[in-house]
Each structure stands twice: as structure tokens, then as C-alpha cells.
Image: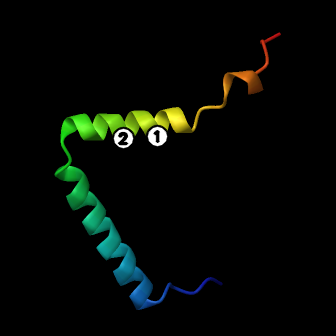
Amino acid sequence: MGADPPEGYREAIATHRATWNTSRQHTSPEIQAAAERQLRDRVREPEEHCADGR
């Protein structure tokens, strides 16, 4: 039913993953913690959008 993705697509994904993993390993723990905190805080719903819980 579904065709395999083209070879170029698979190569691009593999290169992206390799680059991403390499760059993440060289990030200092302080920078990595700050980035994770910012990502975590960014995806939170604003408090005014939440109900009081009934």
C-alpha cells in the first residue's frame, strides 16, 4: 500500500539525526538544562486558560 520513502529522503533524515545527536552531546549541561526548561515552559497552557477543577 505505502511506498518506501525515496533514498534521498532517508539519507537526509540520517544526516539530520547524526548532526543533531552530535551537537547535543557537545552542549554544556547548563545550556542543555536551560533549553529543556524553556521548552517545557513554552508548551504550558497559560494559567488563565485552566478551569478551577470541579
Q: Name the residue under label 2.
A: 35
Q: Is residue 53 above or below residue 4?
A: above
Horizontally, is 21 left or right of 48 in the view? left
* Rendered location of residue 50, percent (x, y): 75, 23
Assess whether mark 2 and mark 1 are in contact (beta carbons under 8 angstroms): yes
* Rendered location of residue 11, percent (x, y): 34, 82
Residue at position x 32%, y 66% in the image:
17
Label 1, label 2: how many angstroms apart (C-alpha)? 6 Å
Q: Is residue 39 above or below residue 53?
A: below
Residue at position x 79%, y 18% in the image:
51
Q: Quadrant of the C terminus?
A: top right
Q: Mark 1 points at which residue?
A: 39
Q: Quadrant of the N terminus?
A: bottom right
Badge 2 amino acid = Ala
Tell me where residue 29 sits by quadrant.
top left
Residue at position x 46%, y 40% in the image:
39
Q: Residues within 10 Å of mark 1 (few under 14, many from 20)?
A: few
Horizontally, is 27 left or right of 9 in the view? left
Badge 1 amino acid = Leu
Secondary structure at badge 1 equals helix
Secondary structure at badge 2 equals helix
Q: Residues within 10 Å of mark 2 (few under 14, many from 20)?
A: few
Q: How many labels does the image show?
A: 2
Q: In this view, does 8 lie above or below 10?
A: below
The tag on residue 19 is none
Tell me where residue 2 sits by quadrant.
bottom right
Residue at position x 40%, y 81% in the image:
10
Horizontally, is 20 left or right of 54 in the view? left
